[in-house]
Image: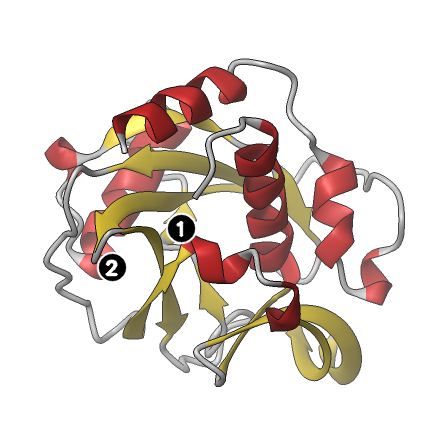
């Protein structure tokens, strides 16, 4: 596990795959090129946490509570908007992960950042932070924000069969519509799509390029 993490950390210090990797899992409405980030975009950060469990490296997602907001009910990495007390995006990601899933801030080792991603439906510019814990955390969810956590082992995410195109109901600040979107189908029931799938796609490319193995 230590070799895996060290090689991954070294790969994060090199140029990232960026938009090309993200677009592999982008919804059609997203388009095939970079997006202009408006000056009023809100900034946020998410935590992609890696940890060993049952002899495999895992990461954790959460199903957001259905609170009526744009991304409610969707599956995402833990995270949220930058607050005034946050000095860095890493602080935002760690604070939000602790608030939402009970992941202890002091136990997470930051490995680096992935490529930021603008999300037009919510007008958020998201900074993904990659972290590592040497053991599985004891998850304590905040029911106001989280319905439940979803743990996934990384080897299963690399199986081609879980990448599918599914009909998705998209909720945006302009209204609702249905679209066909590339998704990761995990545990045969949970669809990871949209921005989270795009960030996950880059992470999996980086893992493959780092020669870290799974």
- Asked if disc 1 and disc 2 are in contact, CB closer than 8 Å, the reply is yes
Q: Could you tell me if residue 141 is visible in this image? A: yes
The image quadrant that residue 179 belongs to is bottom right
Give the class, few, some or many, for how many residues have Cα within 10 Å of label 2's Cα (few <14, many ≥20).
many
Q: At which x and y percent is residue 35?
A: 81, 42
Give the class, few, some or many, for how many residues have Cα within 10 Å of label 1's Cα (few <14, many ≥20).
many
Count the marks.
2
Instruction: Identify the colour scheme used.
Output: secondary structure
Q: At which x and y percent is residue 106?
A: 12, 32
The image quadrant that residue 9 belongs to is top left
Position of residue 43 relative to residue 103, above or below, is: above
Q: Residue at x 33, y 45 (%)?
A: 49
User: Which element type, helix, strand or loop, lies under badge 1?
Assistant: strand
Quadrant of the rendering where the N terminus is positioned? top left
Instruction: Tell me how far mark 1 sits from mark 2, CA to CA.
Output: 9 Å
Q: Residue at x 76, y 84 (%)?
A: 177
Left or right of 19? Residue 117 is left
Residue marked by disc 1: 80
Q: Who comes first in sequence, dot 1 or dot 2? A: 1
Disc on res. 100:
2
């Amino acid at each position: 596990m230590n070799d895996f993490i060290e090689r991954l950390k070294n790969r994060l210090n090199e140029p990232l795959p960026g938009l090309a990797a993200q677009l592999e899992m982008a919804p059609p409405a997203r388009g095939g090129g970079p997006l202009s980030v408006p000056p009023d975009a809100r900034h946020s950060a998410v935590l992609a946490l890696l940890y060993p469990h049952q002899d495999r490296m895992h990461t954790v997602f959460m199903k957001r509570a259905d609170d009526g907001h744009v991304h409610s009910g969707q599956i995402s990495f833990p995270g949220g908007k930058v607050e005034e007390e946050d000095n860095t995006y890493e602080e935002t990601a760690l604070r939000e992960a602790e608030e939402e899933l009970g992941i202890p801030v002091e136990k997470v080792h930051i490995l680096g950042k992935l490529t930021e991603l603008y999300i037009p439906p919510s007008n958020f510019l998201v900074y993904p932070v990659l972290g590592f814990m040497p053991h599985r955390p004891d998850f304590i969810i905040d029911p106001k924000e989280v319905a439940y956590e979803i743990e996934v082992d990384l080897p299963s995410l690399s199986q081609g069969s879980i990448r599918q195109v599914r009909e998705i109901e998209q909720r945006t600040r302009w209204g609702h519509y249905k679209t066909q979107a590339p998704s990761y189908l995990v545990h045969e029931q949970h669809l990871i799509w949209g921005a989270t799938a795009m960030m996950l796609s880059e992470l999996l490319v980086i893992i493959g390029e780092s020669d870290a193995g799974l």
